Image (cartoon, rainbow, N blue to C red):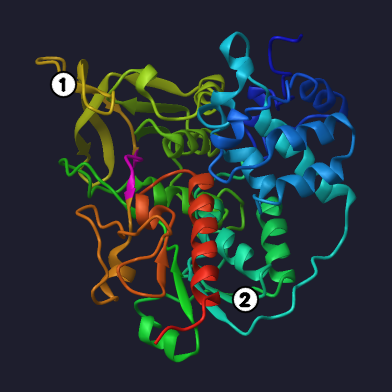
Amino acid sequence: MQTHKTPMPEQPPQLRVRNFDEVALGYTEEMALQEAARCLNCKTKPCVAACPVNVHIPEFIQAVVDRDYEKAYHIITETNSMPAICGRVCPQETQCEAKCVLAAKHEPVAIGRLERFVADWYMKNIKDAVIAPSPNGKKVATIGAGPSGLSCAYDLAIKGYDVTIFEALHEAGGVLAYGIPEFRLPTWVINYEIGRLLELGVDIKCNVVIGRALDMDDLFSRGFDAVYIASGAGLPNFMNIEGENLKGVYSANEYLTRVNLMKSYQKDAGTPIRQSRAVAVVGGGNVAMDAVRCAKRLGAETVYLIYRRSEEEMPARLEEAHHAKEEGVIFRTLTNPIRILGDETGQVSAIECVEMSLGEADASGRRSAHPKEGTEFLLPVDTVIMAIGTSPNPLVTRAIKDLETNRHGCIVTDAGMQTSIRNIYAGGDAVKGAATVIYAMGTGKIAAESIHRSLSEPPTD
């Protein structure tokens, strides 16, 4: 048996760092068949249990082995409405692939790469239209057109619900559109998946800010029987250190939105972005990796990734860290910023950092980080990007009386994603805080099932 994953072709680093084209080029049919043959088709299927949306993984891989790629696609979409997206951005290495039986002795089956192959094959070769089911007379509003809102809307639409998504931005997609760079998730893939929703009859209304343009009373007065809140976690966190208000300091949200959604790297872009020479990105997650890699493509000569723990503790996907290093990003781990310095014009001129050491692990297993006395140093930079996490935007929650939230501003729900208010549900980052795309989709599926069950039950006296 082949002990390692079948490699996926990629753009070479020296070429891709000068463009925003997709880095990973996808499997050929021959590569997909070679990788699919590694699957043991286990009876226990631990990979399925580890998938937040419970894709029938051995079954779809067997369909690939049988060269029935259309069947494989339909098996995936029984539980996952956006396989082309998930095949590209899901952290399979910590979910389904982590539980692959092969991983005990060898590399796991490349489940994500096979999912992407199947979805890409289907998009290229099958032109069938989605058939909208007969309406059931019930209306549901979804707040937010990100992965959780889209997933919930899809599962409700195929059951005959009249679904309207209200999106605050001018384009649908949420974090898929504004947060993930084109070189990881091309816009055409997002548009394809959203297009299938539109074919199902889902109505997406952009430029509508719930909590300002409309509130919950407005939605229920318009005949909606239930509301699903999937407004994400778009409020950026900062360190509250000296100099964060200087010119040239961005939140990762703003920086990536300018690059990804507003296409500021294009010559005719209406929303400009700073032309940086040296950039420091603070953080160690996937958002930080996206920011450093965008900075390189925008022409920065030097790009630092500053992370207070070691690389082993870094939460970013291994593939993203590997790609960033290949593209010339300088990793400054066990390092933490303590202030940002500016010049006489108020522009960023340097970032002062201190070296860190790791202490004991906490209850979650993460080791604490402590500054080393007398190890302060300066890095000359003209741009600083804070990628240290996000919180739910309070605009929606503050507009809903009696909605229960926790101390982090996240909406409290039960196991079925029901909030403290009847017929109002919530999921995704609005409930957990910044998490993964597939987690958000999973909560959308749970909410859709809960809404369907609630609205299908006969009324009680």
The answer to whether 376 appears left or right of 312 in the picture is left
Residue most toward the bottom? 221
Magenta stretch contains residue 386? yes
Image quadrant where residue 377 sits: top left
Alpha-carbon neighbours of circle 1 within 10 Å: few (<14), some, or many (≥20)? some
Q: Secondary structure at mark 2?
A: loop
Which residue is nearer to you in this view: 127 or 343? Answer: 127
Residue 103 percent coordinates (x, y): 59, 16
Q: Residue at x 63, y 63 (%)?
A: 154
Which residue is nearer to you in this view: 456 or 204? Answer: 456
Residue 306 percent coordinates (x, y): 33, 27
Q: Is residue 252 visible?
A: yes
Per the rendering, the mark at residue 161 is 2
Which residue is nearer to you in this view: 187 or 123? Answer: 123
Closer to the chain start, of discs 2 and 1, is: 2
Q: Residue at x 66, y 62 (%)?
A: 194
Residue 224 percent coordinates (x, y): 50, 83
Q: Is residue 121 visible?
A: no
Magenta stretch contains residue 249? no
* Amino acid type for the residue under numbered disc 2: Tyr
Task: Write down the region rendered in magenta.
Answer: 384-390
Circle 1 residue: 370
The answer to whether 206 appears left or right of 276 in the picture is right
Q: Secondary structure at mark 1?
A: strand
